[in-house]
Image: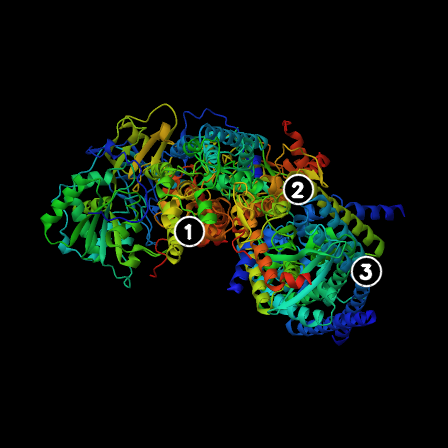
Amino acid sequence: MKLILIFISASLINNFVLTYFLGICPFLGVSNKTENALNMGLATTFVMTLTAAATWPIYTYILVKFNVPFLEYVAFIIAIAALVQLVEMYIRKSSPAIYRAMGIYLPLITTNCAVLGLALFMVLRDYDYIESIIFGFGTGAGFTLAMLMMSGIREELEFADVPEAFQGVSITLIIAGMMALAFMGFAGLIRG
Amino acid sequence: MNNLATKMFLVLTIIGAVSGGILAGVFHVADPLIQANREKELKEAIFVVLPEAKDYKVLEKEVDKEKITVYKGIDAEGKPVGLAFIADGGGFQGNIRIMVGLNIDYLKLKGIRVLEQNETPGLGNRIKEPQFEDQFKGLEIKPKVEYIKYRKPEKPNQIQAITGATISSDAVVKNINNAVAKVLKNFPQEEVLK
Amino acid sequence: MTGNIVIISMASMGGIGAALSLFLAYADKKLKVEEDPRIEALLNILPNTNCGGCGRAGCRVFAEALIQGTASVAGCVAGGQDVADNIAKYLGVESVKANSTVAVVLCRGGNKETVRNAVYKGERTCVAANLTGGEKACVYSCLGYGDCVRACQFDAMAMNDNALPVVFHDVCNGCGACARACPMDIIEMHPVERKLFNYCRNKDKGAVARKICTVSCIACGLCVKDCAVEGGIELKDNLAVINYDKCPQDDQPTKRCPTACILFDEEEKMTKEAYYASLPRKAV
Amino acid sequence: MADNNQNLWHEFKKGLWQDIPPFRLVLGTCPTLAVTNSVINGIAMGLATLFVLLCSNITVSAVRKIVPGQVRIAAYVVIIAMYVTVADMYLAAEYPPISKALGPYVPLIVVNCIILGRAEAFAQKNPIVPSIMDALGMGIGFTMSLTVMGIIRELFGFGSILDIKLLGSWFEPWIVMILPGGAFLVFGFLVALVNYISRKKAETVCH
Amino acid sequence: MDEKAQEKVSEKPVQEKSIEKLVVSSSPHFLRDENIPKIMHTVVLALLPAMAASVYFFGLRAIGLIVISVAACLMTEYIVQKIREKPVTIWDGSAIITGILLALTLPPSFPYYGAALGSVFAIGIGKQLFGGIGYNIFNPALLGRAFLQATYPVLITTWSEPLSKAAKAGVDAVTAATPLALMKFEGKMTSHLDLFFGNVAGSMGETSAIAILIGGLYLRYRGYINWKMPLGYLGSMAFFGGVFWLINPAKYPDPLFHILAGGAMLGAWFMVTDMVTSPVTPLGQWIFAVGAGFLAILIRLFGGLPEGVMYSILLMNAFVPLLNKHTRPKFFGEDIKA
Amino acid sequence: MALKTFNHGIHPSYHKELTSGKGIEKAALPKKVIIPLQQHIGAQCKPLVKKGDAVTEGQKIGEISASFVTAPVHSSISGKVKDIEKLPYPGGGKVLSVIIEGDGTTKEWGNGSIGLELESLTAEALRNIIKEAGIVGMGGAAFPTHVKISPPKEKKIDAFILNGCECEPYLTSDHRLMVEEPEKVFWGMKALMKAVGVENGFIGIEENKPDAIEALEKVVSGSGGSGIKIVALETKYPQGAEKMLIKAVVNRKVPVGKLPMDVGVVVNNVGTAFAVYEAMKYNKPLIERVVTVSGNGIQEPKNLLVRIGTSFEDVLNQCGGITKDGEREVLNGGPMMGISQTILDVPVVKGTSGITVIAGAEIKPNTYQPCIRCASCVEVCPVNLMPYKIGDLGRLYRLDEFKTWGGLVCIECGCCSYTCPSKRPLLQWIRVGKVKVREREKV
């Protein structure tokens, strides 16, 4: 039960993009087409789950054990960088089409704050191993959800008559703001 | 290839080791300061909820693998004035941590201080405003703390909930009740007075 | 104690770094994919407008074709000579003279010159209007809704106040997007050196054509007679057709044209700046 | 020499308007949105970022020639993460309230795209002095942006700036401004404003 | 065509008098006698009973709020359209609807400036920023309401008793809890009859189920709303509410209560059915309505807020483009092989 | 009992009362006719006459033997060929046409006793007669009939439907034919069925023509056990579209990109059946047809029997001419699918089932509003498209998406544009998309 709650909380209520502002760069950059958004979301979800699975042992069995928790950030980021590199190489090999579509955003998963944020929150909230993985997966799912919604809306907006100054990033941010307002409805859905 | 691999290996290892070293050095300097800050913060909170206290003693107990910590406030003459402890529990969004001051007579609260909360700004987060916190001064804890809405409290164990933030008010009250119950059970008055 | 922590930190971080580099080196070897880096480089040279002037579905496809050797280095019409030279330099082959062409609008029958039979209602684009036959009595003429102007990615065209498209000769790079966009096929791509054109595509008999447009070719044949070379200009389908292979470049068969539809291109002087300068100032 | 100075000046200046990070490059959006609910937080975050940016640009510029391409990003990230940890510990030691308010967003400077972006795009290719100018320009531009966001959000959200009440009791604070939704909206409008002004500028230059 | 290019080429002068000429156009050559203002004005008409009920239960202040928000909506639309140099279309009725709906979702005691602010947000940002009517993603009225909920969380959750009950209590305006809040926080139920007629505390236009029902049925009669929407929404609320009710009748209210209380009726008949922000495909419409109903129940029963109608619809609004894209009906003859 | 029909569609105001009660009148003999050499889908005919030749009524003047999908054209009057040139065609553009000046004489085509009996003819001979008579689909599409009734052997045809729906507003030419000449229509239908070789016949008629249903019912029951059934259909546009009619009558769906014969059905129009009868019995080629002249811009709406090649102006003048004031639109066909004419000097052709003149307020406005997603276009589209979407995609030339959203499936019935409250020219945009797709695929 607790796992389900963690999942729902991570994906809906405390959606990383809309409440913690994590992962905004790809959220703005890759959400112009649904297909790209989905691919990016899936790749990020994958990386996030892996990250949770990889950083938890590092934290617990190296940093805490040797009493050097201040190395947290360095250790996490290096693990993430390695994972992303792996995923990148893998996608490049398995699906050049996806690779081409995501272009420069794949390496940007490294600097996707959502991934590092995930590792930090995981430690902050004292999750155990399984919980961490679920948390990572839920966060990724929430990220994908937000990306998908935004990409759908943006595809629709191609037909709309948005004032010139607002086109692009600006209107995307404003829509994100509106989505954040709507997501407030989930607040308090799961307590304690 | 091999050459490159060696170079990669060396560069990363050295950068890793150097940064590890630097961080350890900085940590060595900063850590005591950070610990001191924490200490200070705790102390302040305890003295807010136990105004007469001039010093405190840490009492710890392990119950069901869970560590319970209370701080016994001591006035200038060395007499115990009350217990301070942290009530931690879920709020509307995330945890609420409250420092609770319990009178040494074990009947009334001496005050509370919200340490951490994540409630809705302008609504739930008004639990940290003095108007709300002050209601707990001298509040009777028996049978338990209660809240009522829209009206002035009628009983000595009642406080008025914040309009529109029923859940946050409820969470505060619930957390305090839980923590008080736990303390009453594990730290009997006689034991503390010793 | 302090020393201890420093050592542990250095060891653990150095260890993680080392492990990572080994892992990356391994992965690099196992998963490496060869993508031709030249494609990226060529894309940097190309204008990246994906105008389709090269006849391919975008700049990337063209770049791939270049590498495979199936495209000419001068194939990018939008890029012109500079790009051709750069590509040639990059690929280490000899540069070819870019075939520089320019769009020519072969209709001078704007609102002032043509008779209009009807009032068109509907989407104001040429393709849409062409579905209904349009307003003008001449069914071969420019419809005047500017599909060509919208198709031009280089801002090298505009609709003038007579509802005819104008090509800016200083901007037009001959990508041909306008010609493809025109449903009436009255825009053609011609080498920049060409000067002599018959600015009419009306295949009606002279008597009919004369009635519906003041600048139509009525196939009177005067230019055929005046042409310096036999067969330089022919009559075909009630139109004077210029044989560019035969007709000398500086030929002057245009003097007697009664409707002034066959003439030397004077629009050469039409540059973007000149066009906008000629417009009446609009209040902003 | 004068030319050289001008170049340096240019490296500095571009971060202030032409490439102002959050609004034009749309980098470093997370902190821009997350910590700007008050001016002081915004400034602190900006300065912390400036510090890390400066140090990492210098370091990257210094080691740029010895790091092989495959581990470039990994190496830079480690360097950046180290400086961030330093900044974090410094804040926690000296300014505990701010450290608390900024919470996990200080460590997240590690993944602030500005820093890695500048390291990749600039410091990696340039010597130390221009890299410093670049870092200063970008860092100050970033701090400015955060401050502006902070001013707007704090003013409407609390009726105050830097905790000084500016709007009287007649003003019922707009709570939304300190909520995520408000952050996105303010940011969106500022981006539009910057777009609009630069377009106007470009137009006047043209004619 | 993009706007700029269109302008560049549309300066075609009309030279002759068009009267003697025939008209040419692409088929079809004659069209239904239907237009946007007609639709919108009918909706305004359908909202009259709800407005009347709000005045009846909450007094003249209701009129004030409605007038203020409608005026603010119209003004905003006018100003934005002037700035953008677009044709002014404030009288097509859509801004009026937004104003009325926004006002009807506010508590009767809500300050006038708040209503105006919400209207400005609803029209200025929620609608005109996307290019005006037809392009907005979220329902402007609900967006304005959500903005106000986030902006003035206290003011917007301060309810007053309807006049009749207040008079009995002998005070001008008594702070009260809505039936949903009573149910949620104090476990008290309100009688269905009161909910049906609207003699309860709550947002001005939401309380009277019958008034809204009259308007909604009128719209259905005129053919301007799709029966799938209100049916799907209310049905799904009743279904999911009913499931929980059957699980624990003591804790959770019955389905009828869910349908009658709060904004369910107003949402079902006037907001879920908003043409612009709801899907166009039959399957998409079902998913939209049912999904929104589910979310509403979820938020009502488990969320932090007592009412979830507004958020449920806004959340589903964000899915509409995806729904439209992925629920395309099968073409005629697509599903069979030759 | 619920009447048979298809899903979706619209109920426009039909205005059939203007002409439905008016009998077919014979139009005056025109002084000059213009006979386009291509009045059908398929290859253009080559002229068999030249300038100055004398021709007689019914003489074949154009044919192309090299092609199967084509139909010969005949002179509709006796006289002299004045010229052969490209002239405006009511279906749009210019077509090579023969101009004939009449000498005022007419030919008698017989009184019903001449000609052949059905039993004595083979299917092959029937098809040949139909081809020689130049008969094409008279509902508007003008697809050569002999092609339609020669399905390839592997297609098993088991049903023949006579299309008497006439769902276009204003038009009543088929209606009047069914009321006035039910026997001839019935006979023609039997001939067509024999040519195809099917036993099962249906006549689909919308229930707003009770007199037609009654008249045909009488003939059918009188013939006894002929395997032909009359099916009353709901009055709904586009009930007369082939695919919709097949769905309504035999409940089969024609797959996307396929023809009726792929589901074993052949559909022919009432007018076609009548023309077949005349060709069989009197050896009369298709030189005359019933044309409804109607619309609110017409002084005296009528049903006229007009010779092919008569100019629209001639025809309109026999109906009191068109209104003089305000905007007017002259259509070859009905208001839903007709083609507007820029000039009146165009000939009536084989596919001209009516000339509609609409004027004044009925003319659509030239502006449109943004789409408000009301979904009415989706609700009316008989082929289940999302017209608002494909319209936009066509308008913006987003051709790949246009195709995936089904732009090419569109049957161009116009329901979407008709119903759109924002008056968006959806069908025109879809056509633009189709044109662009075709253009691209040619390259």
Horizontal placement of C136 versus F355: left or right? right
Kindly give the residue lying farthest to the bottom in the view shown: B2
Which amino acid is tagged 1? Gly
For the residues tagged 3 and 2, is the chain the same? yes
Question: Tag 2's secondary structure?
Answer: helix
Mark 3, chain letter?
A: D
Question: Tag 3's secondary structure?
Answer: helix
For the residues tagged 3 and 1, is the chain the same? no
User: How far is the residue under mark 1 from the one under mark 2?
Assistant: 38 Å
Q: Mark 3 points at which residue?
A: D59
Give coordinates of residue F227: x percent, y percent: 15, 55
Q: Mark 1 points at which residue?
A: E284
Q: How is the image coloured?
A: rainbow
Whether residue A17 is situated above or below residue E114 in the rendered picture: below
Q: How crowded is mark 2: few (under 14 residues within 10 Å), some or many (20 or more)?
A: many
- In the image, which is nearer the foreground, mark 3 or mark 2? 2
Task: Determine the residue positioned at 13% across, 55% down.
Answer: F119
Q: Mark 2 points at which residue?
A: D153
Which amino acid is tagged 3? Thr
The answer to whether mark 1 and mark 2 are in CB contact below 8 A is no
Residue B175, visible in the rendered structure: yes
